[in-house]
Amino acid sequence: PANAVSNVYSQHSPVLMDTVEAMVKGKLKGETHPLVLSGGGTSAAVENLPLPQEILIFMVGGVTYEEATKVSEFNKASGGRMRVVLGGSTVHNSTSFLEELKLL
């Protein structure tokens, strides 16, 4: 069928992508998502600034393969206008994620 999805798991969009999309639209607040200045330090004054060409996201606690895939898709779709670099303290699969939840 024309509306068939090649991978049903790719239909879900992780919360991380909501944050990325808000960044692209200039909708993130500086109090919760401060800007790292090139000379060092941070600033909460992000309003009325041009959008960055590169966004670094580091997830303490780890990222998932799904999040990495969605970031890769975003980077390809942006055509080089903006690039997201994703990092994390670990890369989780379903087993490691559930193991982490047991520790809470």
Image: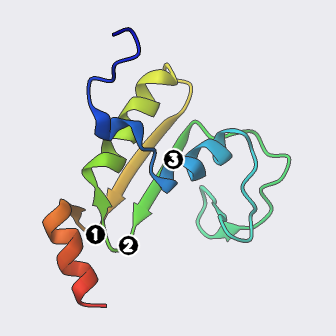
Label tally: 3
* Above or below, comparing residue 82 to residue 89 in the picture: above
On screen, residue 23 versus residue 92, left or right, reads right
Q: Which residue is at the front of the view, 23 or 93?
A: 93
Q: Residue 102 appears at what percent x and percent y?
A: 23, 86
Q: How does the figure colour the protein chain or chains?
A: rainbow
Q: Amino acid at mark 2?
A: Val
Per the image, the residue denoted by label 1 is: 89
**Helix, strand or loop under label 3:** helix
Per the image, the residue denoted by label 3 is: 17
Q: Which residue is at the front of the view, 87 or 20?
A: 20
Residue lying furthest front: 1
Q: Are marks 3 and 1 in contact (CB under 8 Å)?
A: no
Residue at coordinates 59% horizontally, 52% vertically from top-left?
Answer: 19
Q: Are marks 3 and 2 in contact (CB under 8 Å)?
A: no
Q: Residue 104 appears at what percent x and percent y?
A: 31, 91
* Label 3 vs label 1, nearer the camera: 3
Q: Which mark is residue 60?
A: 2
Q: Are marks 1 and 2 in contact (CB under 8 Å)?
A: yes
- Upstream in the sequence, badge 3 or badge 2? 3
Give the alpha-carbon distance from disc 1 to disc 2, as whole Å.
6 Å
